[in-house]
Amino acid sequence: MALLAHCRRQEPGAWRELYQRHFNFVFASARRLGLEPADAEEVAHDAFLVAFRKLDQFKEGKLTTWLYRIVANIASDWHRRRRVREAFARLGVWVGAQPSPSPERMAATHSEKRAVERVLARMKPKKREVLALFELEGLSGPEIAERLGCSEDTIWTRLHYARQEFAELARAQGLHLNLEVEP
């Protein structure tokens, strides 16, 4: 716990030592949560950024338990984002289609893109904005909150309802995108 006190006082080298002591644990946790090595490394770095921002919220208990919870939350978000992007990619919405798709596939992709655009156009603007910033632009909750000038809690609430709204509107148009992912 002395190291945490040094980190809280922002003493030189304290964060580096905390990072070095716990990186292997955080990385291994991310791998056990199903992430590939490169993704696990990125999640590990993100976890330390969250820990740095929220260190004052850690009051008691084991540091590794707290770090694990951070990693689990980030990994869950990582998996959900990947599934959302893959669903959109299957439609060719934001990710380019195959190099030389058949004319039939090109027509189907064009039709699906228009259907997704219609769904997005029908969404409430604030929900659409948060969905696009989080799911497509990859911004974090705090980044979106800063950009939109509202609280982070508001962002998470809007995102929750935006996913629901998108899924409902998509189903109504006959699109079958699996955007509803358990937390």
Image: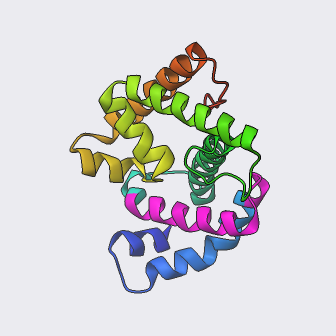
Q: Is residue 144 visible?
A: yes
So how many labels did they put on this image?
0
Q: Give how far across and how far down residue 63 sits, in percent.
A: 57, 59
50 within the magenta span: yes
The kind of secondary structure the magenta stretch mainly shows is helix
For residue 88, side relative to residue 104 (left or right): left
For residue 125, side relative to residue 149 (left or right): right
Most extreme residue toward the top is 172
- Identify the residue at image location x=26%, y=51%: 146
Which sits in the foreground, 118 or 17? 118
Image quadrant where one finds the C terminus: top right
Is the residue 170 above or below the residue 74 in the image? above
Which picture quadrant has residue 45?
A: bottom right
- Identify the residue at image location x=54%, y=28%: 115
- Identify the residue at image location x=56%, y=36%: 113
Is the residue 54 above or below the residue 124 in the image? below
Q: Is residue 87 visible?
A: no
Most extreme residue toward the left is 149
Q: Give how far across and how far down residue 23 sits, in percent.
A: 64, 72
Q: Give how far across and how far down residue 66 sits, in percent.
A: 56, 52
Which picture quadrant has residue 156?
A: top left
For residue 121, side relative to residue 163 (left or right): left
Magenta part of the protein: which range?
31-53
Which sits in the foreground, 36 or 174? 174
Is the residue 4 above or below the residue 172 in the image? below
Is the residue 39 above or below the residue 59 in the image? below
